[in-house]
């Protein structure tokens, strides 16, 4: 797969069809693959791909609006591209999509922490992640370390592409059992868990920086007038930051999981975004990023929208 | 608890619900003084962030009211609002905030009585919940 990706990238750059290729390169340690922008044929050799490449690359597209860009895109990347098109941030015909049918990405930070010692090498074999540390070789099940969004992903295949690398995969099956489980807890328990999660947040904003939908030049959380969120670490401010962020994601979040995967503090975020996604699907028949022509969820309404909660 | 007098931020659209409140006033219909009214042009002007911020800033509850569907002065403002309120309300309840801290209603300019009734209902419900223990800023 990596060979094919490099081949395609090299050809595109050589022929001048694109200025840059958005992809991934090896990170500084095993189990990490970070975004990489290949601008020359030589740089193509640095491109790689594996389920440890957690970042949704659509995040970088608006920054390359003056370039012709090729992008490695999984199902959720193409959905993010659709949302960005529908919001007028990018144009489809300036983007060359190298589609990647996706087997899901791994919770790399969590996995690394569970290993607890220095990792020398990692590989994936027969549904297992094989991790060589300085002292031993450990095997864990691939499926056990899947990003929660990937576990229930309905659209693992790119919705559109200019070239496809590999064979289309079968979705694992959709649904929101995680959200349903949370709903079953009683009210006070839910609040307790919510507070505990949000309290871990150190306001580094990695979740925002990594999110393809967070392209705002001026984020509400930085606003001083009005001051939606005060500086500091009062629980209510951390909670306000996340509640409002999730509101901004309604009908836009494509459930790629990048925000939660990049969080250095392990704050759970997907139980919030996925809750809204579930509601929109169940109650409004709306799934974000399926159609670039469709207005954003909050930019339209239906006369028969749910209203029984209003007196 | 008996003398607990909650503050309820009440956001009313100018054309229907605010006029409804006015009518309740001029008709001398009594309603609880716990509601603190902010007038906005339309319920569509209400950003859900207002509600989050008001709660964080310490009000006991929030009540938003606009024109009945089909009656919005700006034709469709309340339809857009309805979606936003739905998402917000469900999200806040999902994370465990008590039901009954946010309320929505449609009240027309001619419904002075209805305005007072809902003001009473909302106030009673919030009084039953008592002072807020969740989402309270440490000062
Ligand atoms: S990445 Fe994690 S710690 Fe950083 S702002 Fe987001 S939730 Fe908070
Ligand atoms: S909020 Fe998280 S899951 Fe949703 S699009 Fe942004 S990064 Fe992806
Ligand atoms: S959290 Fe909201 S305001 Fe901030 S960057 Fe994301 S979408 Fe924009
Ligand atoms: S003017 Fe009353 S809801 Fe729009």
Image (tube, coloured by chain):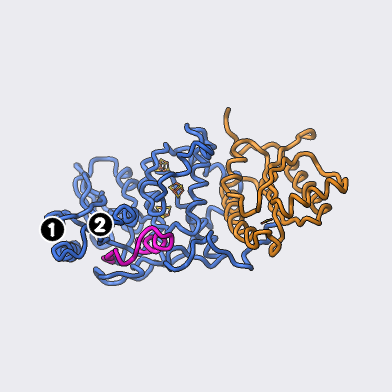
Chain colours: A blue, B orange
Q: In terms of image quadrants, where is residue B76? A: bottom right
Q: Find residue A22 and name its label.
A: 2
**Viewer-nearest residue: A180 or B80:** B80
Percent position of residue A140, x then y: 30, 53
Q: Is residue B60 above or below residue A8?
A: above
x, y percent for residue A105: 32, 57
Tell me the residue that label 1 is attached to: A41
Please, which residue is most extreme toward the left here?
A: A42
Judge whether residue A15 is colored magenta.
Answer: no
Relative to B115, residue B33 above or below = above
Asked if labels 2 and 1 touch by Cβ distance under 8 angstroms, the answer is no
Q: Quadrant of the N terminus of chain A?
A: bottom left
| Residue A192 horizontal side relative to residue A55, left or right | right
Q: Earlier in the sequence, mark 1 or mark 2?
A: 2
The quadrant in which residue B10 appears is top right
Q: Which residues are magenta?
A: A77-99
Residue furthest to the top: B139
- The magenta stretch spans residue A88: yes
Name the element at disc 1.
loop
């Amino acid at each position: 797969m990596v060979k094919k990706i490099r081949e395609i990238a090299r050809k595109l750059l050589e022929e001048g069809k694109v200025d840059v290729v958005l992809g991934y390169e090896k990170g500084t340690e095993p189990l990490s693959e970070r975004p990489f922008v290949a601008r020359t044929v030589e740089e193509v050799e640095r491109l790689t791909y594996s389920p440890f490449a957690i970042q949704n690359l659509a995040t970088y597209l608006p920054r390359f609006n003056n370039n012709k860009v090729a992008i490695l895109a999984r199902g959720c990347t193409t959905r993010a591209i659709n949302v960005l098109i529908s919001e007028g941030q990018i144009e489809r015909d300036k983007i060359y999509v190298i589609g990647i049918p996706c087997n899901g990405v791994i919770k790399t930070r969590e996995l690394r922490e569970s290993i607890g010692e220095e990792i020398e090498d990692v590989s994936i074999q027969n549904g297992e992640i094989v991790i060589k540390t300085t002292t031993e070789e450990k095997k864990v099940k691939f499926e056990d370390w899947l990003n929660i969004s990937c576990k229930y992903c309905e659209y693992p295949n790119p919705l559109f592409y200019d070239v496809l690398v590999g064979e289309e995969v079968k979705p694992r099956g959709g649904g929101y059992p995680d959200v349903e489980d949370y709903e079953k807890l009683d009210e006070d328990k839910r609040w307790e868990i919510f507070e505990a999660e949000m309290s871990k947040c150190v306001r580094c904003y990695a979740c925002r920086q990594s999110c393809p939908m967070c392209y705002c030049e001026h984020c509400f959380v930085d606003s001083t007038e009005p001051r939606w969120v005060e500086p500091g670490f009062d629980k209510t401010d951390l909670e306000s930051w996340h509640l409002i962020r999730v509101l901004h994601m309604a009908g836009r979040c494509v459930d790629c999981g990048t925000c939660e995967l990049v969080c250095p503090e392990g704050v759970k975020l997907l139980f919030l975004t996925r809750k809204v996604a579930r509601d929109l699907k169940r109650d409004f028949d709306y799934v974000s990023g399926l159609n670039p022509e469709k207005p954003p969820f909050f930019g339209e309404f239906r006369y028969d929208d749910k209203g029984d909660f209003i007196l | 608890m008996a003398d607990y007098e909650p503050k309820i931020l009440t956001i009313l659209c100018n054309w229907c619900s605010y006029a409804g409140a006015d009518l309740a006033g001029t008709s001398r219909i009594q309603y609880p003084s716990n509601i603190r009214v902010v007038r906005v042009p339309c319920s569509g002007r209400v950003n859900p962030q207002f509600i989050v911020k008001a709660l964080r800033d310490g009000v006991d509850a929030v009540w938003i009211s606009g024109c009945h569907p089909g009656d919005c002065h700006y034709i469709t403002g309340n339809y857009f609002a309805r979606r936003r309120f739905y998402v917000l309300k469900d999200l806040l309840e999902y994370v465990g905030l008590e039901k009954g801290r946010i309320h929505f209603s449609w009240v027309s300019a001619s419904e002075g009585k209805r305005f007072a009734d809902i003001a009473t209902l909302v106030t009673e419900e919030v009084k039953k919940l008592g002072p807020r223990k969740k989402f309270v800023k440490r000062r």
